[in-house]
Image: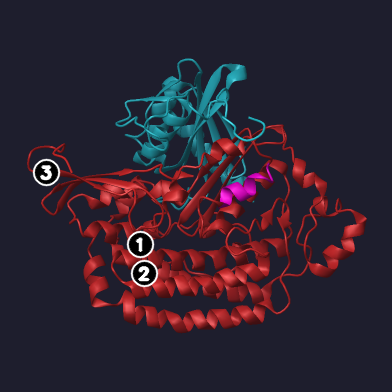
Amino acid sequence: MSGAGSGERTLELLIGPQHPASGHMRLVAEVDGDVVVRLRPDIGYVHRTVEKIAETKTYLQTIPLIERPPLADTANHNLGYVMAVERLLGVEAPPRAQWLRTLLAEMNRIHSHLYGLGIHGIMLGSSTAFMWAFGDREIMIEMAKRLTGARITYSYMIPGGVRRDLPPGFAEEMEKALRYLERRLPDYDRIFFSNPVTRARLEGVGVLTREDAIRLGVVGPNLRASGVAYDVRRARPYAAYPELDFQVVTRSEGDSMARMLVRVGEIRESIRMIRQILARMPDGPILAERYAKMIPPKWRDYVRETGRIKFPAILASLRPPKGAEAVSRVEAARGEAVFYLVSDGGPRPYRMRMVTPSLRNVVLFSHLTRGCRVADIPAIYGSLDYFPPEADR
Amino acid sequence: MASGSEVGEVAAPIEGALSGISSELSVRGEVVSIRVRPEDLREAAERLLRLGFDHVKAVTAIDRPGEGIIEVVYHASSYGNPGLTGIIAELRTSVPRDDPRVPTLTEIWPSALYQEREQWEMLGVIFEGHPELERLLLPEDFGGPPPLRKDFKIPTEGINA
């Protein structure tokens, strides 16, 4: 602590970079007694130079790189990046691949929201919410493993399609998982969401008005909890979303409670969507014909029998046209993710811009904490589902 | 994915809003790309805001040493105007690589605050009038040239270093 604030009344309080949240960042708070006068987020502690490294990797090698920062929400970022690459190349994934992508994206949304709710719980001192959410997130991790072979970083979506088809019995197992989650949500409600302590800590705390949410370019549940019904899945539908029935969950209060409840509502909507996807999944190939026909003949039986793509060599040396540019946006779990790719005709991206939801939301730390109590800082932080590695990239 | 007619319809009002500003428009999917001179950047952004493009999604600088320029690109869209949410306005300009200065757009679009700061740090673009052009992601003692410039050499380690 030091007296470097705006006068002798105030103290500078350094919170972090080591603190019991998820990932590392520092908050520099100027406090007058228990009241926050000003707070500045100091980020970058988990910066990985993803955009620079992408310039040294092929388009395919960049996929695992993209997945590291948003951990817990890898599928949605994988999808956004691959959509941008496909626009550069002028290739489209076949319908079944689009539905499989949407399936994993919604599974990942449930996983990521449980992760965020658990972290929010522990920030408020509810170890139970943390333990339950982190336990229950395991269900979607296990189901993702059955579909993709990996628990977290799936690299499932590739230019032109997906790596694997649905394994046998997946729909039945998923139905059990969804029923379990539906049974669990009322338990969470009783012990955490509607808990008087939770409500006292969150209601009316960190209120974001609709006007400010728009002006500051906030994304995801944080935006929708302030009454803005913007969701990329509706505004610019992609993958299988045009064919799915779902609500864009919004609330009008704009406080920390509303942000949490929007995520809970979105878990219910994702459950509905996964049921629709598994009931109506179209048949057909999972890789665009342009690449599928380049799979060596000796591997084609293997691909047909196992539903697993054997990568044709072309994927290792994709070269989009010189001067081609592409922008993509997807509704990731924490909000809109934007990718902007520039090609110089070579096998590596000339420039790969990755704007994650947490980077867009970092502006809220100083905005929402002005005038709040020190004890409100973790309540607000948790309500933003801010993930430092996702912001730092 | 984007229907051409829908974007074509929105390109017309953008063209109208920018009348009097020297600009080149092109349409690429859901993106309406607008190239302006650096001195017209602020005015173009103000007019886009008045049209309903109320937030910035991405600020990107691109180093092009072969041409001696750095491009600065803003991707803006709308939350408040349902007719524009599906469209992205791509406002771009080029500045000399040895003196890359553009006016900040943070007063027009506060949503550009952190990303302009990041592009300053990573590519050395000076956003004149920005309230806090300070280190964001790099270590405080980072001494090298802006690392996303093409002439930045990535230090390697291991057997080939």
Q: Are marks 3 and 1 on the same chain?
A: yes
Is residue A28 found left or right of A312 in the rendered image? left
Q: Are marks 2 and 3 on the same chain?
A: yes
For mark 2, give the secondary structure.
helix
Q: Is residue A372 above or below residue A173?
A: above
Q: Point out the stretch of residues depicted in magenta.
A: A59-67
Q: Which chain is cyan?
A: B
Q: Which residue is mark 1?
A: A225
Q: Position of residue A79 (x, y in %)?
A: 61, 54
The overriding secondary structure of the stretch rendered in magenta is: helix
**Label 2 vs label 1, nearer the camera:** 2
Q: Position of residue A3 (x, y in %)?
A: 13, 39
Tell me whether the residue at label 2 lies in contact with that at label 1, contact meaning CB atoms closer than 8 angstroms: yes
Chain A, colour shown: red
Tell me whether the residue at label 2 lies in contact with that at label 3, contact meaning CB atoms closer than 8 angstroms: no
Q: Are marks 2 and 1 on the same chain?
A: yes
Q: Which mark is residue A298?
A: none
Residue depicted at 67% across the width and 65% down the height: A149
Q: Amino acid at mark 3?
A: Thr
Q: Which residue is mark 2?
A: A261
Residue found farthest to the right? A297
Q: Residues within 10 Å of mark 3 (few under 14, many from 20)?
A: many
Quadrant the C terminus of chain B occupies: top right
Residue depicted at 28% across the width and 66% down the height: A124
3 or 1: tag closer to the N-terminus: 3
Q: Which mark is residue A10?
A: 3
A98 or A111, nearer to the observer = A111
How much space separates mark 2 and mark 3, taking CA atoms? Answer: 35 Å
